[in-house]
Image (tube, helix red, strand yellow):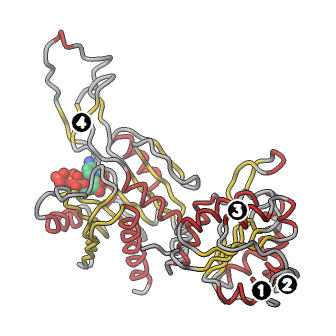
Amino acid sequence: MNAFRDRRVVLGVSGGIAAYKAVEVCRRLVDAGAFVSTILTEDAHRFIGPVTFSALSSEPVHTSLWDDASPIPHTRLGQNADVIVVAPATARIIAAYATGSSYDLLTATLIATRAPVVICPAMHTEMWEHPAVQHNIAVLRSRGVIVVDPQEGRLAGGDVGAGRLADPDTIVGAVEGVLSGRGRDMEGMNITVTAGGTREPIDAVRVIANRSSGKQGYAIAEEAHKRGASVTLISTVDRPTLPGISLVEVETAAQMLQAVETHAPASHVVVMTAAVADFRPVHTADGKIKKQNGIPEIALEATPDILAALGTAKPEHQVLVGFAAETNDVVENARGKLKRKNLDLIVANDVSAPGVGFGHSTNAVTIISADGSETFVPLADKHSIATAVLDSVVAVRSARRSQ
Ligand code: CTP
């Protein structure tokens, strides 16, 4: 389901060097199907021209309380909006919004709306960390405003630190969260996700591998990031992902176990999407095995079962999610794994069905919970499957809280 289709988004752009990134945000919102009205503050004009936004938005850019055909553009924009997003939001805009001060079209619109508001601050580190700015941010959060925190990175003038505008994917993801009704419901959660198939070395050039593409694990990591979680992605594959995700690269089951043992204890949620090899060569030959020495016999041994180890050491607060790739008796086998490995959820897929599992961009799964409930998610792209898995994670956590 497309959360953006025919929804009205007001994009407020205030005066900071990051204003140029708002162009990308605008384009992505329009491409996703939203009707985007852009408000440019007077200071924003110093960084980016209105023509760019008029060309990309769904209607000509709005710049002033006075030059619009409507005598009250702020109420019209505010009333019609499904969501307002301010990117970048300067310290001044944040202060004005927190104190209810209205001095231009953007500040008037923010105060004249009942729509949800997403604020994406961008400023120098000293300004971002100033107690006055942090106080204003806390006030806005307490009123239900969604704040997409700035990232660490290079700032204007060559300085490095916190205050860089969140990347367009994260901002568009936060807007999508609001429009889909989920918001940033994973804010404050640490989640560790594994992705891809492990590769177990036979010699210097050969490995035992499997067909896992890592797509499903990446989709879970990315959807969790959009929902506000702090994400560690432990991966064996070389795929691009969102800049806010912390990536740990591994190759073998042993390396994955070590990385998982480092990150899992502090994680509220661990999702083992990876296809971990069940067997590995007992010895890895030095150099390359040469064929003139005859056909080698490769003795195998079992790899550590990472998920089972996680289940044994599971902290009380943690939600542990496994995957089960099956070809027959899918749900029954998956239920067995859920019990044996002490999981809270297991995502079962019938990898023999068309379009399902390894290498495909689509998947069809049954999500089984330790309390016995089952959710079938028919064939859908892997991001939709990821959304359904995370919905189940959030449901487990809220059921625990209400116990
Ligand atoms: N898994 C793991 N470590 C292993 C093998 C599997 O952590 N050495 C995890 C996978 O990441 C997945 C779950 O266990 O989340 C189930 O994997 P699967 O291969 O379906 O099941 P197995 O337990 O290996 O059982 P079998 O292969 O016999 O079906």
Q: Nearer the viewer, mark 4 or mark 3?
A: 3
For disc 2, the marked residue is 102
In the image, which is nearer the foreground, mark 1 or mark 4? 1
- Neighbour tally class for label 2: few under 14, some 14-19, many 20 plus, Cα within 10 Å: some
Instruction: Please tell me whether mark 4 sits on a helix, a strand or a loop.
Output: strand
Circles 1, 2 touching at the beta carbon (< 8 Å): yes
| Label of residue 31 in the image | none
Which amino acid, mark 3? Ala
Residue density around tag 1, few if under 14, some if 14–19, many if 20 or more, within 10 Å: many
Cα–Cα gap, marks 4 and 2:
66 Å
The C terminus - image quarter: bottom left
Q: Secondary structure at mark 1?
A: helix
| Mark closest to the chain's N terminus, 4 or 2 | 2
In this rendering, position of residue 248 left or right of residue 107: left
Q: Nearer the viewer, residue 238 or 230?
A: 238
Residue 344, image x and y in percent?
31, 70
Please indicate whether residue 49 sits to the left or right of residue 226 in the image: right
Name the residue located 57 percent from the left edge and 73 percent from the top edge: 34
* Residue 167 in the image, given as x and y percentages of width and height: 63, 58
Q: CA distance from mark 4 to mark 3?
A: 49 Å
Q: Quadrant of residue 197?
A: top left
CA distance separating discs 1 and 3 = 20 Å
Q: Residue 62: x percent and y percent?
A: 78, 75
Of the numbered discs 1 and 4, the one sitting upstream in the chain is: 1
Q: Label 2 vs label 3: CA separation?
A: 22 Å
Q: Return the residue at label 4.
A: 280
Q: Which residue is mark 3?
A: 22
Whichever of labels 1 and 2 marks the residue nearer the N terminus, that label is 1
- Give residue 399's position: percent from left, percent from top: 39, 82
Residue nearest the viewer, comparing 356 with 197: 356
Q: Nearer the viewer, residue 334 or 8?
A: 8
